[in-house]
Each structure stands twice: as C-alpha cells, then as structure tokens.
Amino acid sequence: MQEQNRKSSFPIVMLLVSVALWIASLSNVAFYLGNHGSMEGLTVLILGSIFASLDIRYCAVYANYVWLAAIVLLALRKKVVPVHAALWGLALVAFSVKAVYVDEAGNTSDIVRYGAGFYLWYAAFAVATIGTFAGKNKERKAASAADGIKMTFDKWLGLSKLPKNEARMLLQYVSEYTRVQLLTRGGEEMPDEVRQRADRLAQRRLNGEPVAYILGVREFYGRRFTVNPSVLIPRPETEHLVEAVLARLPENGRVWDLGTGSGAVAVTVALERPDAFVRASDISPPALETARKNAADLGARVEFAHGSWFDTDMPSEGKWDIIVSNPPYIENGDKHLSQGDLRFEPQIALTDFSDGLSCIRTLAQGAPDRLAEGGFLLLEHGFDQGAAVRGVLAENGFSGVETLPDLAGLDRVTLGKYMKHLK
C-alpha cells in the first residue's frame, strides 16, 4: 500500500518541483541586454502579459504560457505526445530570439546572453514534461504490480461487475471447472492465463454481447447447443413449442421444422422421438451449418434443406404430420430490436421487416398443401399476437385453432389442424 501511495504521489511531487523552479526563475535574470542592463523573469512575465502578441519578441508568450500548458497536462496526467512535441517546439523558439521589447513604446534591446532565470524556466518546463511521462510509466508499473497480486476465483467473482450467475458461467467456461469444483476450489489462485481470459470475456459481456455467444453454447431442453451470431439464441419459451409438437406427433410421424436456426427444435424432436422422420430447413447457410453441427454432436437423425420456407433445394416428398416454425415475428421498428441481446442476434431471424405477421401468413397459406389429413401447423409468436395468429390460421382453413400459454401465462404457441374435408 505504501508503494502504491508513493507511485500515485509522484506526479504531484513533480508538479510542485516544476512550480518551485518557475517561481525561482522569476527572481533571477532571464536576459542580459546590451544597452539596458538585464531583465528578470518577472519583468519578462509582466511585459509578456501586458503587451502579449504573436510577435516573437514578447518572450513570455513562448515561455510562461507554454510552461503553464505543460503544467496542465501534468496535472491531468495526459501523455499526449504530439501536444508535448508542439510545446517543446514553441519553447525552443526562444533560442532564436535575438532582441526583446523593453518598454511600452516598442523599444527593443539585443540579448547578449541568457541568465539563470532563463535556464530555470527551461528546467521547470522539463520537470513538468518528465513528470507527465514518468508518471504514466509508474502507473503502468503499478498496474503490472496489481496484476501480480494474488487473485483467487472467489475474489474474481466478488470483484466482477457482472451479475453473479453470469460471472460464474464465464469463470466455469475459462477454468473448465464444474459449478461444484468452482465452489470447492474458490480459494485457489487463478492462473494468469485463466484470469486474463476471464477479464476479456467479462468485458465483452459488459459491452452487451450475449453470454450464449461468448460461451458459444446454450442449454435447451436439457442439452447443450452450439450457438453463434448466425442463429437466434434458443429461449426457454421455445421448449413449449417442442412439447406441443411431441404431444401431437403420431408414431413414425413426419415433422418439418422451417426456419430451424440452430436446429434446437428439430434436433430435440429427433432425439425425443427417434421413430420420427425430421426435416429442418433455413434460408441461411451459416445457420444450417450450425444446425448440422448440433445434430451431429448430439447424435440426432435430421434431414436438412436450404431455402426460403417451402421453396427449398430438396423437394418435399410425401405429406407431413407436423409443420412447425418459430418464424420472425417482431414488428419492424419495434424498440426491443435495439435493446439487450437482440442487438447482437441476426435481424432476419427476428423481424419480417413488416407487421410481424407476414411470415406467419406465408406458412399458414403454404402448409395445407403439404400437411397430411389431420396434420398440425404449430407456430411460435409474440405474447400479444395470439388473436392475430389465430385469425390467420382460421382464414386458411385450419380447424381447432388454439393458443397455448407459456409458463408466464402469456400467449406463445398457436396451432391448428388441417382437415381437407372441412376446407
């Protein structure tokens, strides 16, 4: 602590020394003049202050005021190299001065030689500059010393500005410890590499980046799915969509997940119902690549197709028992698109850039031609869109249309049955 106090007081000491040297320069001779004896530093200051102009012979303009600028930089601890270089350039101009004004009438006198006041002023200026740069170096050394202080896992968690659950997730990720291991080994010192990685990831989160993208994974329906900025982050609400599919999927049934994103819905259904045939499609190649990876990593049997909704590069053969989708349903211009995690997620997967219902209309219009008799269309949507989505399904000949709530009691999934004879 004493060492840190010494380091933090260094700029103040240098500032005081610089001021003392400048005060001393005022009482000493600055110039010895040919016909007018000599001129003390105070006289230079007064003349320069009263008659200051850009005329180089008013030396105070290039002396005392330049020193004052250096003092301000030192007080603010601003190590701005171009500014300091410019100040020194102006200061050195004083060496080119051959004569100075000696009175209000504009009379001048040649400088025969420089006095102690002149050199004391330069010393004050130099100390101010050295104090600024050396002070910064000492601060860096102090920071390095702080980095060397023992940092335990528990201490890092305690100092983190993140919510504790997020900080703990990041720490588990970089340390490769389980939650239990982190609790039991919290008093251990963090390896430098682990600490540096944790600091970098924490800063990314403080900048707003979603934890799921930072970690590259998100749990969904009890499984870990790879996620990245090319796909939406799976939400707990979407698990209700999966459960609704599983409740209506017949034995050996066929399911098509449109706009699959990370593949969370399709892969989960395939794993929960190995007897079913599951297809997943998306317009985004990077999203499809992510979905394929999740299917491979989790051992799910899923057929993948690329394309926009029903128009894919793999013709649909046969009818489907379930067509399911979590389409873009946020209305264009909705303020939530510029808030929180949504700022980082693919906009094309969040909004239809219209009224929030255009993709839902496309799905409702195209599904009847592809559904088996008695098949279901299931759609996830916004909490305030239940009535509108029910209307869209009813307009397209679906029967038994209903909206299922999520755990918060909000409208979340709307479904309808396709009965050809009722169309």
Image (spheres, grey):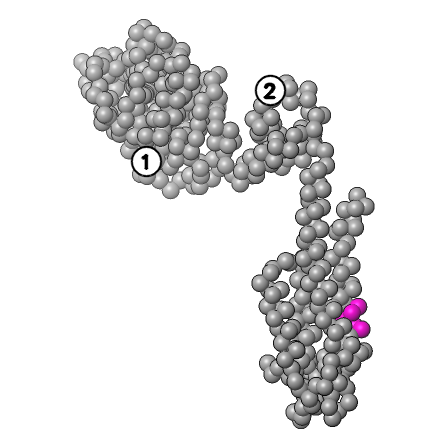
**Which residue: 50% across, 32% down?**
214
The image quadrant that residue 105 belongs to is bottom right
Estimate the x, y position of residue 327 in percent, counting from the top left. 34, 28
Q: Is residue 148 magenta?
A: no
Compared with 174, 267 (above or below) is above
**Which residue: 80% across, 78% down?**
28
Q: Can residue 419 be seen here? A: no
Q: Is residue 22 magenta?
A: yes
Q: Observer-nearest residue: 307 or 323?
A: 307
Estimate the x, y position of residue 37 in percent, counting from the top left. 77, 89
Q: Observer-nearest residue: 15 or 323?
A: 15
Q: What residue type is labelled 2?
A: Thr
Q: Can residue 216 be seen here? A: yes
Looking at marks 2 and 1 on the same chain, the residue that comes earlier in the sequence is marked by 2
Mark 2 residue crowding within 10 angstroms, few (<14) / some (14–19) / many (20+)? few
Q: Observer-nearest residue: 124 or 151?
A: 124
Numbered range of the magenta stretch? 20-24
User: What's the distance in space between the residues labelled 2 and 1, CA to CA?
Assistant: 40 Å
The image quadrant that residue 77 belongs to is bottom right
Estimate the x, y position of residue 386 in percent, counting from the top left. 36, 27
**Which residue: 34% across, 11% down?**
248
Location of mark 2 (residue): 178
Location of mark 1 (residue): 352
In the picture as drawn, the residue positioned furthest to the front comes out as 113
